[in-house]
Image: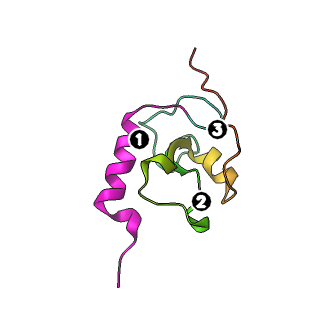
Amino acid sequence: MAGNPRNGRPYRRLVAQIKAMGAPCCYCGHDIDPTLDPRHPLSFTLEHLIPLSKGGSLLDPANARSAHRRCNSARGNRSAPAQQRASRRW
């Protein structure tokens, strides 16, 4: 029986790559503190623009963005809005 694909090396590598970019949350535009505990509402999570439950690719970098845990959870499995919010970095 296969294990959870999110525990595999390719997925962890993708998460590390996106996290290292230091991009702000793709929904609220605020910076994400990489030192927060993973259970904190403002911690980093990997957001999939096309939800996995709707056929999105788990390992496709084009389908992955940075998001706060709270922002990602609030979206649920709905498809991404047509226009992402602009970054607040000016």
**54, above or below 35, in the image:** below
Q: Tell me the amino acid under the disc marked 3.
A: Tyr
Position of residue 4 measured from the top left corner of the image (x, y, whole percent) = 40, 71
Sooner in the amino-acid sequence: mark 2 or mark 1: 1
CA–CA distance in space, label 2 to label 1: 17 Å
Q: Residue furthest left?
A: 9
Please name the residue that numbered disc 3 is placed on. 27
Q: Residues within 10 Å of mark 2 (few under 14, many from 20)?
A: some
Q: 33 left or right of 70?
A: left
Marks 1 and 3, the one that precedes in the sequence? 1
Look at the magenta stretch and give its main secondary structure.
helix
Frontmost of labels 2 and 3 is 2
- State the residue at coordinates (59%, 45%): 41
Q: How far apart are the two marked residues, 2 and 3, measured between alpha carbons? A: 15 Å
Q: Quadrant of the C terminus?
A: top right
Q: Which residues are magenta?
A: 1-24
| Residue of label 2 | 51
| Mark 1 Cα shell of 10 Å, populated few (<14), some (14-19), many (≥20) | some
Residue at left 43%, top 48%? 61
**Residue depicted at x 36% and y 64%:** 7
Image coordinates for residue 12, horizontal then vertical, percent: 34, 54
Label 3 sits on a secondary structure element that is loop
Q: Quadrant of residue 28?
A: top right
Q: Where does the N terminus fall, quadrant-wise?
A: bottom left
User: Which residue does the numbered mark 1 point to in the structure image?
Assistant: 18
Q: Is residue 86 left or right of residue 47?
A: right
